Amino acid sequence: MVSRSYSRASLTIPNLITLARILLTPLFIIFLIQGCYRKALIVFLLAGLSDLADGLIARRWQQKSRLGSYLDPLADKLLISSSFVTLSIAHQIPPWLTVVVISRDVALALGVLLLRLAEYPLTIRPSLAGKWTATLQLATVLVVLVGKIWFVPLELLLGLFWLTGGLTALSGIQYLYRGLRMVSQSQENGRREGGRG
């Protein structure tokens, strides 16, 4: 049974926009590899606008769907991860920052997978630190791209790198704590129900 908060239709307009954003990612990476930073910046801005558009349309016309709840974060992660890896290879982003960003995402994905396999009740809600992390990661890529076209102070870039890395690590620790707390609460509830039986 589909929850009432989700649309029954899967191929909604927001989902089609999200799919288009996913298709923009390979084009973005190709421009980065070719050193066409102006074109890469345009595609990156288009991807960002599409992210805003699908969210606004989904809320305004009540077109949220279960498929969209998976596609949207997947599109974001594909864009961010591929951006950091490619820009790191091109020596535009420090390798340590890319390792922090990718490691956090991999750790979260593995944690969710393990909790689902163990059949723990799982409620995924983005934390405030998680939202700020995503914003800073996008801002980092944007500023790096802008810096390849116009002048950006090195101090601004370095500060952004450290701020993004620190908040990414902090949000990862916060999600880890949440996961461990879910497991602890689930086990405690299981013991209580077992005691009643």
Image (cartoon, rainbow, N blue to C red):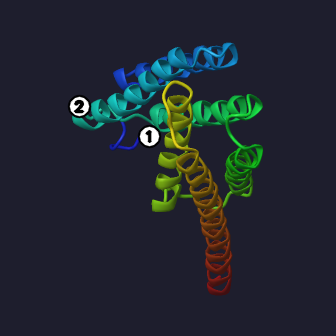
| Image coordinates for residue 130, horizontal then vertical, percent | 52, 56
The residue that mark 1 highlights is: 1
The amino acid type, in three-letter code, at marker 2 is Trp
Residue nearest the viewer, comparing 136 with 109? 136
| Image coordinates for residue 105, horizontal then vertical, percent | 67, 47
The amino acid type, in three-letter code, at marker 1 is Met
Q: Residue at x 69, y 52 (%)?
A: 104
Which numbered disc covers residue 61? Answer: 2
Residue nearest the viewer, comparing 31 with 17? 31
| Image coordinates for residue 75, horizontal then vertical, percent | 55, 30
Residue 69 sits above or below residue 163 on the image: above
Residue nearest the viewer, comparing 177 with 186? 177
Between discs 2 and 1, the one toward the N terminus = 1
Label 2 crowd bin: few (<14), some (14–19), many (20+), radius 10 Å: few
| Image coordinates for residue 76, horizontal then vertical, percent | 54, 35
Give the distance between the C-alpha atoms of the residues marked 2 and 1, in whole angstroms.
22 Å
Residue 87 sits above or below residue 193 on the image: above
Name the quarter where the C terminus is drawn. bottom right
Judge from the rendering whether residue 195 lies leftward or rightward of residue 140; answer left or right.
Answer: right
Q: Residue at x 37, y 38 (%)?
A: 6
Give the residue at the far bottom of this rendering: 195
Task: Say what secondary structure mark 2 lies in.
Answer: loop
